Amino acid sequence: MPRGPLIAFPAVLDDVEAMVEFKPVATEPGPKTQVLRLGSKFQLLKVDIQDVPVLKTSVKIVDTARDLGLVIDSGLTMSYHVTAVCPSAYYQLRQLCTIARSLSDNAAKTLVQAFISCRLDYGNALLCGISDDLVQCLQSVQNAAARLVTGAGRREHITPVLRQLHWLPVRQRIDIKVMVLVYKSLHRLAPPYLSDDCQLVTDVGRRHLRSADVHTCTIPQHSQGSAIEVLGSPDHGCGTACPLNCDSKT
């Protein structure tokens, strides 16, 4: 990440301070104010700034930050988020174990859905493309929750248990969330900051390609010439387009 944005950032805040001068509000950053650098490991090594001047004080640059319940790290690996979700989910499971035997199957399933599944699904679109090890950590939580609801043993195969509960595995739940967001973006049902950057190959004015005959989304090129695949090959390799079945009948 270049140093330019970090140096220009205080100038923007000075303009904000001048704008709110006529309306007395608390403009000083509080203890929850944090600055997070985003980039690859090699890009972050090029930045040696430890704090950023904000108005009349300075804010320390951190490696992780919590935003709306999601723990974002500098490399966007989401490893810190998964590390925070799993212990919390296991704690809730241990609490539910003490009362599960006195509940009906439907009541136990409802409680697990409320305390465990919602934690796994919250913000899971950001987990698209994370490593298999992190997915396995989340999958272990779901497996433990499924065994709690059904009473299945630890040595029983988990796939039939998940099918019995009609629960998709964690990886599929992430893919479904991304598909829904892309579908809504293509049909202008999502906010503009998503819809404006989600376009089909046939709508961007490029030359006719073989991919134009299928519903394929183009990925906006970044300034460094790289592309990030939203949903593509099973191995989540990089590419400039991603296939998606976005027919109105699906």
Image: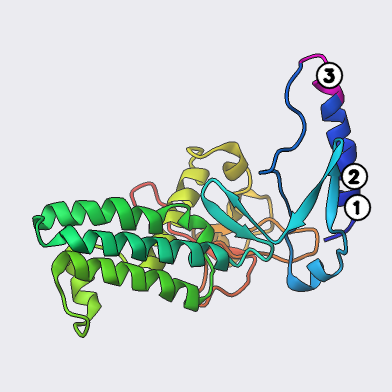
Amino acid on which disc 3 is placed: Glu
- Can residue 30 be seen here? The reply is yes
Measured as percent of width and height from the top left, residue 39 is found at 74, 64
| Residue pictured at 11% horizontal, 58% vertical | 105
Up-down: is 196 above or below 15? below
The residue that label 3 is drawn on is 21
What number is the disc on residue 4?
1
Measured as percent of width and height from the top left, residue 102 is found at 9, 57
Helix, strand, or loop for circle 3? Answer: loop
CA–CA distance in space, label 3 to label 1: 27 Å
- The quarter of the rendered structure image containing the N terminus is bottom right
Specify start and end residues of the magenta stretch as a single range: 18-23
Helix, strand, or loop for circle 1? Answer: helix
Amino acid on which disc 2 is placed: Ala
| Labels 2 & 1 near each other (Cβ < 8 A) | yes
Amino acid on which disc 1 is placed: Gly
Horizontal side of 109 relative to 219 (left or right) equals left
Q: Earlier in the sequence, mark 3 or mark 2?
A: 2
Q: Residue furthest bottom?
A: 155
What number is the disc on residue 155?
none
